[in-house]
Image (cartoon, grey):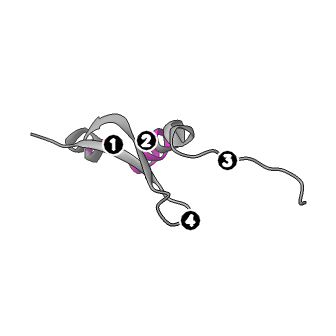
Amino acid sequence: MSKQMLLYARTNNQGSTCNTDIGYTEFEWEKLSEDEQLEVIAEFTGDVVDLWVQPEK
């Protein structure tokens, strides 16, 4: 049985690793092209990390 693939994110803060299920098995993931994998990662990035831009304080 193929394992489910999870997207992980970590910042420089200790203990800040989190993950989210991206809906692909390991077998399905390996069949995707690198570009397709990058699209999936981009789609789910917001589920594991908040990114923003703000002025310097």
Assign the N terminus to one quadrant of the image: top left
The residue carrying mark 1 is 32
The residue carrying mark 4 is 13
* Three-letter amino acid code of the residue under disc 2: Glu
The residue carrying mark 3 is 51
* Three-letter amino acid code of the residue under disc 1: Leu
- Residue 36 painted magenta: yes
* Three-letter amino acid code of the residue under disc 4: Asn
- Of badges 4 and 1, the one in the foreground is 4
Up/down of 53 relative to 10, above or below: above
The residue carrying mark 2 is 36
Locate residue 51, reporting x and y percent: 67, 47
* Three-letter amino acid code of the residue under disc 3: Leu
Q: Which mark is residue 55?
A: none
Tell me which corner region of the image, top left, top right, bottom left or bottom right, holds residue 5. top left
- Of badges 2 and 3, the one in the foreground is 3
At a point 89% along the width and 60% down the height, the residue shown is: 56
At a point 84% along the width and 50% down the height, the residue shown is: 54
Q: Are marks 2 and 3 in contact (CB under 8 Å)?
A: no
Q: Which residues are magenta?
A: 31-40
